[in-house]
Image (cartoon, grey):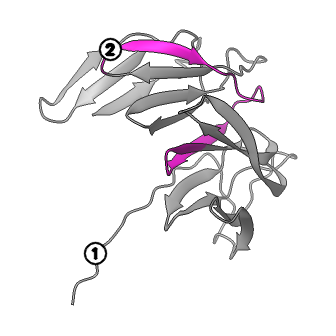
Amino acid sequence: QLYAVGGFDGFCRLSSVECYDTFSNSWATLAPLPQAVSSAAVVSCLNKLYVLGGAVDDTTNTDKVQCYDPEDDKWTLLSPTPFYQRCINAVCLEDIIYVVGGLLSKIFSYDPRNDSWQEAATLPGPLESCGLTVCGGKIYILGGRDENGEGTDKAFTFDPASGSLEQQPPLQRCTSYHGCVTILQRISR
């Protein structure tokens, strides 16, 4: 199932949550977010959906962690993020959520099993609206915008197992507000 969570309709932040069922080819309205947000990080982990931070209005960000359980169609507020930010991204790797962006230079990790936050690594400079994906046990951080609002072509990998952050060859162009995904291909002989 696919989920569309929160957002902005041109006038206000949304608390709406919709679910698309690929088998029935239909959308359903689910329980709304406790707090309407846009530009939040949204990630699935351990069969639940997490909405982290985001914008409450044009000038206010939130530190709320809103967790949706699809079994009960209910939201729960968890331990807040250690930051109030929007334009952040998150991925889940080995049942841990990693958050990058929001013009922060730190990478944060959240363990949903014990509802706790930690600093995982530090980037060379702050980023927001970057691409984030997982491949081969590493987190790839691609592009984004820097503290001056300029797009960047920088690329990094973060290996949670070793704690190492490495700069990679740059993207072919500066880019931000973009999507990022990993497609695993099977190599056959």
What residue sits right under mark 2 in the picture?
72
Residue interval drawn in magenta: 71-97
Residue 186, image quadrant? bottom left
| The residue positioned farthest toward the front in the image shown | 114
Q: Residue at x 59, y 24 (%)?
A: 38
- Seen from the viewer's position, the closer of residues 185 and 110 is 110
Give the SS element for disc 1: loop
The answer to whether residue 1 is above or below residue 133 is above
Q: Where is residue 171 in the image (x, y as percent from the top left)?
A: 64, 69
Q: Nearer the viewer, mark 2 or mark 1?
A: 2
Labels 2 and 1: the sequence-earlier one: 2
The amino acid at mark 1 is: Arg
Instruction: Calculate the distance from the C-alpha at mark 2 to the C-alpha at mark 1.
Output: 36 Å
Residue 71, image quadrant? top left
- Tell whether 152 sits left or right of 111: right
What residue sits right under mark 1 in the picture?
186
**Quadrant of the snapshot with the N terminus:** top left
**Quadrant of the snapshot with the C terminus:** bottom left
Q: Which residue is drawn at 35% across and 20% down?
A: 18
Residue 153 appears in the picture as rendered: no
Q: Where is residue 39 in the image (x, y as percent from the top left)?
A: 61, 30
